Image (cartoon, rainbow, N blue to C red):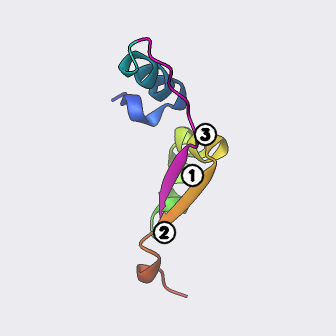
Amino acid sequence: MFRAWDSPRATFQILKRLSAGQPCEREAIITMVDGQQGARQLDRHEEAARQIAVADVVLMTKTDLIDD
């Protein structure tokens, strides 16, 4: 299933439409990565790597659940 928020290009198009012709400036792209499942998702889903590649900021979540 395609989800618009999985694709950086689709997300930009949605934001462009939402601005309805008004000036809209992107300050940063923030991508969240699940600390427990992130590596597995990168192996399984090519789009996950694309999201990280275009991100200005990557936030890792669930770091308290990661085993050393």
Element under label 1?
helix
Q: Amino acid at mark 2?
A: Gly
Q: Is residue 39 left or right of residue 4?
A: right
Q: Residue at x 50, y 25 (%)?
A: 24
Q: Amino acid at mark 3?
A: Arg
Give residue 54's position: percent from left, percent from top. Answer: 64, 40
Choose between 54 and 67: the one closer to the eye: 54
| Gap in angstroms between the C-alphas marked 3 and 1 | 12 Å
Q: Nearer the viewer, mark 3 or mark 1?
A: 3
Element under label 3?
helix
Q: Residue at x 40, y 20 (%)?
A: 19
Q: Give the labeled residue for mark 2.
A: 35
Q: Is residue 7 above or below residue 43?
A: above
Magenta stretch, main secondary structure, is loop
Q: Quadrant of the N terminus?
A: top left
Q: Give the labeled residue for mark 3.
A: 50
Q: Residue furthest bottom?
A: 68
Q: Give the labeled residue for mark 1.
A: 43
Give residue 23's position: percent from left, percent from top. Answer: 50, 20
| Gap in angstroms between the C-alphas marked 3 and 2 | 17 Å
* Magenta segment boundaries in residue numbering: 21-35
